Each structure stands twice: as structure tokens, then as C-alpha cells.
Image (tube, rainbow, N blue to C red):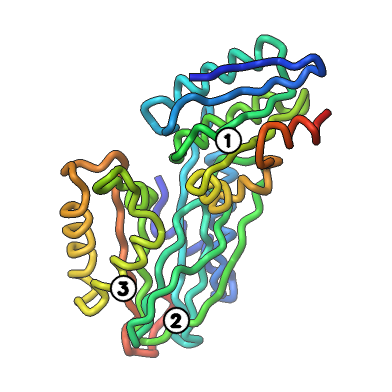
Amino acid sequence: MISAEFFWQMALSASQCPRPEFAVEVLDRRFGQLSFEDSYFAMFLALVDHHRHELVYCQAGAPRPVLVTADGTANTVGDGGYPVGLMAAAVFDRVTMHFSPGDRLVVCSDGVLDAVGPGGTALGENGFQELARDTASLPADRQVAEIERRLRDWAPTPDFADDVSIIVLQRGDHAEGQNA
Amino acid sequence: MLKAKTLENGLTIIAVNEPRLVAANAPKLREDLAGIIDAGNNRLILDLSGVDFVDSSGLGAIVGALKRISVRGDLVVCGLGQSPAQLFRLTRMDKVFRIFGAAEDAVAALS
């Protein structure tokens, strides 16, 4: 089992600097030893540095999230990355980006992008970006439910073929505190 | 689901006749690719031009075939449509596999 303590130990260096790529690498090596056949998983691990107004992340096979800035502009972020446990000796990247108060990051699993709508077309990255942008005026805790509702309305069948996970991470106004 | 043809130069072109490689048929894809490899074919061109969509399970089966061949041969991919190509880029598999436009391009490069 992976605990929160594990993540804090692995994702922060001794000097408290974010290093999500190291935590992902540790998981990759452990899972690579355990896994059989071709099983693997994808993850997006991010830490917020409130003092530097930065979001530090490692994208490991997961879809590109959407950054919705406080002015409502929505853009996908990330250049992709190896999934966890798939390739031996995979190298994982750490990416740092600006993350201001009021910005929010909308993260989803591939089951969201692969959800099939009318005419057999998948939602895709552009469709998810639009969903994230169009629902961004809602409070962050209601945005997840609204994205799910719109996704279910759009798809002709009530059940999704793959698991559907959505996380909205909003940067608060406070500049105090530790990494979160 | 697979149609394999081995050329005189030892290259085997494998055409995938399924529009979607997903959790439901990934085990069959894995099994069939393993059968082709275990029969002694180890210079493979996987033609995905008939495939519109690959999910994480389908990708796992394709990578599994590459691992099975290991250092004994090679597995290259051709005919990637827009959606499968996006998945290969997202997961960096475009750095792991050699990718060609059409099967003829792959044959020319490997011959």
C-alpha cells in the first residue's frame, strides 16, 4: 500500500524541494519488479509551492491536464511521459509551471478522454479542455460533479467503458503554509 | 484479428484487423502476437493502419510483444492513425518504437 507518508518522503527532498519525478521513479522500479505480463499504470503527481507560486509535476502516461487560469483561459499542459512500470529504466521528468492564486488544474484519467459520444467519436483532449473551461466558473468542488454530469449527458450509454477519474485542484489566495 | 505475412527477406508484416484495440480484445492480441514471435518470427512490422483507437490495454499488449522479442529481433510500427499516434506520443512510446508511415516504408528501411 502507498501511504501519504510515502509520498511526502519521496516527493520532497531533504531540503523540502519538490521532486515528484523521484517518487514516480521509486514506484516505477517497485511496480516493475512486481508486475506480470504487461500491466502498468499512469499517474500525474503534482505539488504546489505556495511561496514560489509554482506547481511542480511529473506526468507519467496520464492525459495532459487543463490549466484554467483566474481569467478563464484554458490550456492543456505537459508533454507526456512514460507510464509507471511499463519500460525498464524509464526516465521521468519534473516540470515546473506558474500557478497563481485563483488558477486551477483539471486532471482526468484516460477513461474521460476515451468516453465515446454520439456518432462514436471519443471526447478527446479538445473536448475535455472545453469541458474544463466551460465549467470553471463553478466552485472547484462542484466543477467535478458538473463535468461528470455533462459527460454522462453527452455519452449515449450511462456506463463508461473505462474508469473515469476527475480531480480539480484550485490554488487558494493564501501564500502561507507548506507545500500542499 | 491478425494477418501475418512473412517476406523472403525474413520480415513479417502483421496487419491488425480490428478498429479498436481495447481491454476486451487486448488479451487476444497479446496471445496472437506471442504465437507469431514464438514461431520464430522476430523481425516484425505491426501495421496499425486499420486501427482507429488504442487504449492503455491495447498499448500494453503491443509493448508486451516488443519485450518478448527483446534483443532477438525488432518490432516496428506503421500506419498509426491520429488517435493511436497521440497515445504513442503521450506515453513516449514514439521514443521506444520505430514508427513508419506505411508498411512499404518500414520494409524499405528494414531491408
Relative image position of residue A79 (x, y in whole percent): 56, 62
State the residue at coordinates (49%, 80%).
A54
Q: Amino acid at mark 2?
A: Phe
**Label 3 packing within 10 angstroms: few (<14), some (14-19), many (20+):** some
Gap between marks 3 and 2, in whole Å?
Answer: 16 Å
Q: Chain of mark 2?
A: A
Q: Are marks 1 and 3 on the same chain?
A: yes
Residue that badge 1 annotates: A33
State the residue at coordinates (83%, 28%).
B111
Gap between marks 1 and 3, in whole Å?
Answer: 40 Å
Q: Chain of mark 3?
A: A
Relative image position of residue A51 (x, y in whole percent): 47, 87
Residue that badge 2 annotates: A99
Compare marks 3 and 2 and give the one earlier in the sequence. 2
Would residue A139 be found to the left or right of residue B84 on screen?
left
Q: Quadrant of the C terminus of chain A?
A: bottom left
Q: Nearer the viewer, residue B33 or A54?
A: B33
Q: Amino acid at mark 3?
A: Arg
State the residue at coordinates (58%, 29%).
B64
Q: Quadrant of the N terminus of chain A?
A: top left
Q: Which mark is residue A133?
A: 3
Question: Do tag 3 and tag 2 residues touch (Cβ < 8 Å)?
Answer: no
Looking at the rendered image, the disc whose residue lies closer to the viewer, 3 or 2, is 3
Compare marks 1 and 3 and give the one earlier in the sequence. 1
Secondary structure under the numbered disc 1 in the rendered image = helix
**Label 1 packing within 10 angstroms: few (<14), some (14-19), many (20+):** few
Looking at the rendered image, the disc whose residue lies closer to the viewer, 1 or 2, is 2
Q: Chain of mark 1?
A: A
**Is the residue A160 above or below the residue A13 in the image?**
above
